Amino acid sequence: MSGFSQDYEPTQDDLDNHSNQLNDNNDAYWQSRDYDERPSDWESRDE
């Protein structure tokens, strides 16, 4: 998987976190983009 070093085997928590940060329906997505939480108007934003 890209983003991890070649010698590192990601845990399920690593994979879940990676997935959550790519899902705009998840707070982790917004937190990784310097928001405190998902904004109430998240569906109408073009990020």
Image (tube, rainbow, N blue to C red):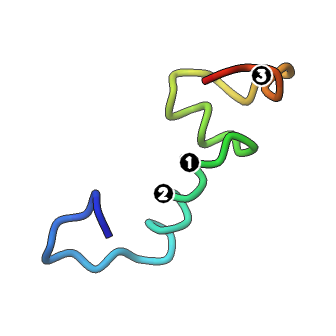
Q: Secondary structure at mark 2?
A: helix
User: Going by the image, does 45 lie left or right of 35?
Assistant: right
Q: Circle 1 sits in a helix, a strand or a loop, which is it?
A: loop
Disc 3 residue type (three-letter): Pro
Residue 39, above or below 16: above
Residue at the extreme left of the image, as rendered = 7
Quarter of the image containing the C terminus?
top right
Q: Residues within 10 Å of mark 1 (few under 14, many from 20)?
A: few
Residue bearing the label numbered 2 = 18
Residue at label 3? 39
Residue, x 41% and y 77% (percent of image)?
Answer: 11
Q: Which residue is located at x 56 percent, y 48 percent?
A: 22
**For mark 1, what is the residue?**
22
The Cα–Cα distance between marks 3 and 2, rounded to whole angstroms, is 20 Å
Which is in the foreground here, disc 1 or disc 3?
A: 1
In three-dimensional space, the C-alpha distance between marks 1 and 2, rounded to whole angstroms, equals: 7 Å
Distance, label 1 to label 3, CA atoms, is: 16 Å
